[in-house]
Each structure stands twice: as structure tokens, then as C-alpha cells.
Image: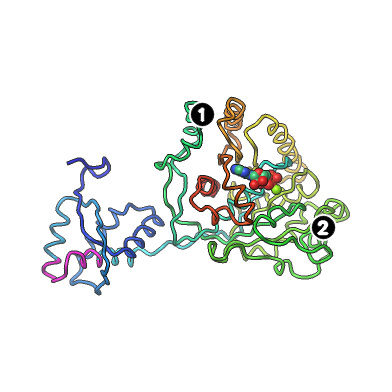
Amino acid sequence: MSMPATSNDRVKVVSKLPGWLRQNLKVRTAQLGIEIQTAVEQGIAAWCDLASATASVDTGGAESFSTFLPPGQWEEFRGIAEDRRVSLIQGLAQSVQLWLDTHPAPDVQRSEIPRRIIVCNQKGGVGKTAITAGVGEALSEDSTRLFPVRVAKALATALRDSEDQPDSAESDNDPLSVEKLPGHGLRVLLVDFDPQCHLTNQLGAAPLPMNGDSLTNHMAGETKGELRDLIVSVDEEHFGGRLHLLPACHDAFLLDVRLSAVRARESALERALMPLESDYDVIIVDCPPSLGLSMDAAAYYGRRRDGEVPGESGALIVVQAEDSSADAYDLLTNQIEDLRNDLALDIDYLGIVVNLYDSRRGYIATSSLQGWVDIKDPKVVGLISDLKEQKEAVRMKQPLLSYAPSSQQAVAMRALAREIS
Ligand SMILES: Nc1ncnc2c1ncn2[C@@H]1O[C@H](COP(=O)(O)OP(=O)(O)O)[C@@H](O)[C@H]1O
Ligand SMILES: [Mg+2]
């Protein structure tokens, strides 16, 4: 009889388990990073050690369930179940329920200071807005549900594939590289910091009316109310009320001019957003395609604060795998360097995301990707293919991860979110 390599020292057992209990087991083991067979083994061992059977579990509609247990465990369990006059199916259900009861879901990890992720590049059209939304969506997904994530596929493999086989879509579809993992369950605020209001429009929200209250006014110190009152919740059904958006207003086209009259203007974004910080675990700023004062304020906001671990907050740079992106990258990093030096700040790089990647474009794409990888510090933390779902989601004004939750792009966005968290 052939068995999977990981189960060589175990014996396959086939029984039945109700669908809901199997699902709970699947989610909890993923949350705790434990193999299902280990959890079942622990549950059965604990159940056998009890003085008597536990409360009866509804096993109606139980379906076939197989797992691998250490040799002899199933026989011992069978004997004890007989003594307790419960069926094997009931005994197994009780064992699994016992394991679930004794292994509660981990609490969502919240840091005291919310993480600030500044998504930037002064070049337009590279995908800053798409990455801001995708990362925010991934970080706010339900921690009690499982979502497909591209995990095992390292960048090195992607690079090798791109040399070996010109069709990247095919290698991306490799099911072995996709794993189901629980969401992060974090409270996320997306800040549309671009006067073009792309993020706001893409998520189906309305840009704030001119002459009303706005982030620009708060940064310029001319508030007309609470910034909190401008925030909208995005797709509550999918994101459970954890994903919020601070919409932009076209008045931000004048932000740099207005900031020039503000004292300590680098900290203007921080002053404006500070009152909201306690409501969120992560704040992601979608920067405009410019290197003006507003970019300084965004970079300042992403600096490492006292007591913050390096790499928690900082700049996430989105580029394309093409040569013209490299010049833009140099300009941006020079500006961040200047800010670091002039104001003696620690501004960390969270990494480079290579977006709109299509290895079918041949040498230009693959050699540029290699160029980004060779930078090493910051390292490439995400590789997102040029695929239709992103454009469709924008057209439909829906978040990518709820519009096409299992698409290769969604799966890669979740991988990126994990890479930087
Ligand atoms: N990975 C992707 N695949 C396909 N289309 C993409 C991808 N990333 C971005 N796009 C599309 O490219 C355009 C520019 O992206 P956007 O995120 O608005 O860039 P930026 O914010 O840097 O200007 C948008 O129409 C967007 O939908
Ligand atoms: Mg944009």
C-alpha cells in the first residue's frame, strides 16, 4: 500500500465526520499552524484519557473523513468507544470537538502603534492604487475563514519559470503553490492621498465634495469637522466592517500650495491622521504620482516611531518590470534619503512590489525583474502578474479580493500582505 511520504509512520483510518465539524477543524488547524492529523491524534488521545464520554455531538449528515494516526491508536480508541457504548463516529466527533474546545482560536495580533504603509512611486500607472487596495483587503479578511494564498512559490521559482517557459499564466496556475490560510482580521484604513481620487472611485465610493471637509483641510489646519466622519466602510459583507476608506477630494490638487504655508508641514499628515489611529491596526496611504511636499508628508508619516520595531511601518515601492521604472525608483529613493538625512528620521523600506509582470514580454521583463531582485535591500516582496481580474474589478468598482477572491491576483495580493506583515 502506498502512502504519502509525510505519513510513513502513520496508518490511514477512514471514518465519518459532520461537514461543519470538519470545517471548524480545518480553520482552527490553519489558524494554529498545526496539521489536521496531529489535531485528530491529540483529540483522540485526550478523549481516551477522560473518565467518560463527553457531551454528545450531532453527527447527522456525517461524511467520509480519512486521516493518518500513529499505529495502534485507532484500535485503542475503538476499544474505549465500545466500553463507553458510543459509536466510532460519535467518539471521533467528540474527540475533534474536545480538541477544538481545548485549542481556542488565537487572538488577532494587534500592535499598540498602528502600522503605517506608504505606497509610493511618483510614476503614474504602475499600480500603487491597485496594491494599496489589494494589501488592505488581504489584511482585513476574516480570521475565521480560509482564503487561497500563493505561499510556496518563491520568487526564485518564478524567475526560473519565466526563463524556462514563456507562459507565466500557466506556471501561476500551479495548484501546489496555493494554500488555504485564515485571513488576518485586522482593522484597516485606506487613505486616498491622490487628488485624482482613483482609489475612492475604484472602491465604489464618492470623492468628497469640494468646499466641504477633507483631509487637505485637516492637513492645512482648517478643519470643518471630525476627519472620522468622512470615513466609509468598504464591502462590509466580505470584509466584516474592518476595511475602511478615507476618500479623497479634488481639493488635494492644491495640497502642496496650501502646505507651503503650514509650519512643520512634514508632519501635517501625521497630525491629521493621529486622532484616528486608535481605531486601526494598519493604515495604508495611496500616494499621488508626484514628489512634492505631500510625498514628504507621507514619507514622514511612515517613519519608524519610538518603540516601533524596524520594518513595521515604512515605504512600499511599486514598480513595473521595465527599464523606465528604474529612473523613477532612483528619484524616489533619493528623496526619501534626503528626508531621512535632513530631519534625522528612520524611514524603513518595506520592499519593492513588481507589478504588471508579464514574462511573455520576454527579455525586457525578465531582465528587469532580475534587476529589481538584485537590489536586495529593499527586497522584492511581491510579484503581481498583468491579468484581467484587476482591470475588471476596477471597472465593476469592486474590491479585487471580493470580486475575484480566488483569482491569481487575489492569491498573490494575500502572499504580498503576508510577506510584509
Ligand atoms: N496587476 C495588474 N494587472 C492588470 N491591470 C493592472 C494591474 N495593476 C494595475 N492595473 C491597472 O493599471 C492601471 C494603473 O494602475 P493604478 O493602480 O491606478 O496605478 P497608479 O496608482 O500607480 O497610478 C489601472 O487601470 C489598474 O486597474
Ligand atoms: Mg493611483
Say left or right for 101 vs 123. left
Give the numbered dot on residue 35: none
Label 2, residues with CA under 10 Å away: few <14, some 14-19, many ≥20: some
Q: Secondary structure at mark 1?
A: loop
Q: Which stretch did the figure color magenta?
A: 81-94
Report if residue 86 lies within the magenta region: yes
Q: Main secondary structure of the magenta part?
A: helix
Across and down, in percent, residue 168 comes to 51, 34
| Ligand 1 picture quarter | top right
The residue to which callout 2 is attached is 251
Residue 83 is situated, as x and y percent measured from the top left of the image, at 11, 69
Quick check: can you spot residue 16? yes
Badge number at residue 166 = 1
Q: Which amino acid is tagged 2?
A: Asp
| Amino acid type, residue under disc 1 in the picture | Pro
Residue at 32 percent of width and 61 percent of height: 22
Some atom of ligand 1 lies within 8 Å of the CB belonging to the residue at label 1: no
Q: Is residue 12 magenta?
A: no
Per the image, label 2 sits on a secondary structure element best described as helix
Question: Disc 1 versus disc 2: distance between alpha carbons?
Answer: 45 Å
